[in-house]
Image: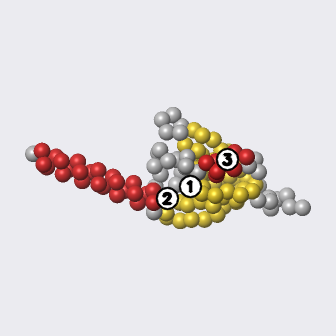
Amino acid sequence: MKKTLFFIILGIVLLFTLWYTSVYFATYSEGVRSGELIKFSNKGIVFKTWEGEISQGISGAQIFSFSVEDKDKEVIKKLEEYQGRYVKLKYKERFATVSWLGDSKYFVIDVEEEESPHFRK
């Protein structure tokens, strides 16, 4: 009986480890999006995550929500500095969301300030 219970628990742990590893390390897609950085905050009660949004249109109808991992300190610093400016975000999309990493499947891995196409000189 104890061996059976042990193997059931071991199987559950292995399945969770396999799922988490595939969600965390395997990327569904990678890409770049540009827009005005309208929100960036550290939120949560149990798990504090960095969440942000960029507006991809003049009217703000197209909002791209993203997360940033805690380990990406340079990206967090740049996003706090670029608040309200036009930015280009390089991101990776994961297969699923994990609550302690962020609310979104899109994780920003690099950011740079860009000239707005709406207000070019």
Nearest to the observer: residue 44 or residue 110: 110
Residue at mark 3: 77
Q: What's the amino acid at mark 3?
A: Lys
Residue that mark 1 sits on: 107
- Say which element carries label 3: helix
Residue lying at 49% horizontally and 64% vertically, measured from the top left = 28
Q: Position of residue 87 (x, y in %)?
A: 72, 56
Residue 66, image x and y in percent? 59, 52
Q: Quadrant of the C terminus?
A: bottom right
Q: Is residue 18 above or below residue 69?
A: below
Q: Secondary structure at mark 2?
A: strand
Residue at image x 57%, y 38%? 43
Tell us which disc is closer to us: 3 or 2: 3
Residue 39 in percent (x, y) is at 67, 45
Q: Earlier in the sequence, mark 1 or mark 2?
A: 2
Q: Which residue is mark 2?
A: 94
Nearer to the camera, 21 or 54: 21
The answer to whether residue 119 is seen in the rendering is yes
